[in-house]
Amino acid sequence: MAKFSPFDAADYLDDEETISEYITAALEDSNPDVFLTAVRDVARARGMAQLAKDAGLGRESLYKALTPGAKPRYDTMLKLLHALGVKLSASPIHS
């Protein structure tokens, strides 16, 4: 019988382009927890302690902000995304 390891997206988030595409895909979902989960996956891939330091946040604050159901402040998310090396952008829904 085949044994499978649990899938962990953080294992594959090893460069800024992949991270950017992953976060962009999460932003397309209407459930805000999908976005928070994606950012948390990236944070785990990069190291939570290092990300907290790079974003100027406490580690506990980072965990709290990325918990499903959390309502993190906009400026907190911008700091996190900047520390991860990605930026948000907007595009028209209808071209």
Image: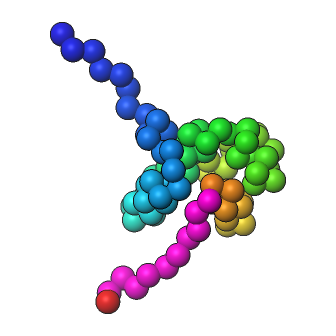
Instruction: Using the rendered image of the protein, determine whether residue 37 is visible from the camera's viewpoint.
Output: no
Q: Is residue 21 magenta?
A: no
Residue pushed farthest left? 1
Which residue sits at x=67%, y=39%?
48
Apparent side of residue 16 relative to residue 9 in the rendered image (left or right) = right
Which residue sits at x=39%, y=65%?
28
Which residue sits at x=56%, y=40%?
45
Which residue sits at x=38%, y=32%?
7
Q: Position of residue 3 (x, y in %)?
A: 27, 15
Magenta-colored segment: predominant secondary structure: loop
Quarter of the image holding residue 76? bottom right
Residue pushed farthest top? 1
In the rendered image, which quarter contains the N terminus? top left
Q: Position of residue 43 (x, y in %)?
A: 60, 44
In the rendered image, which quarter contains the C terminus? bottom left
Instruction: Using the rendered image of the protein, determine whether residue 28 is visible from the camera's viewpoint.
Output: yes
**Picture mark count:** 0
Q: Position of residue 10 (x, y in %)?
A: 49, 39
Q: Position of residue 32 (x, y in %)?
A: 49, 58
Q: Which residues are magenta?
A: 85-94
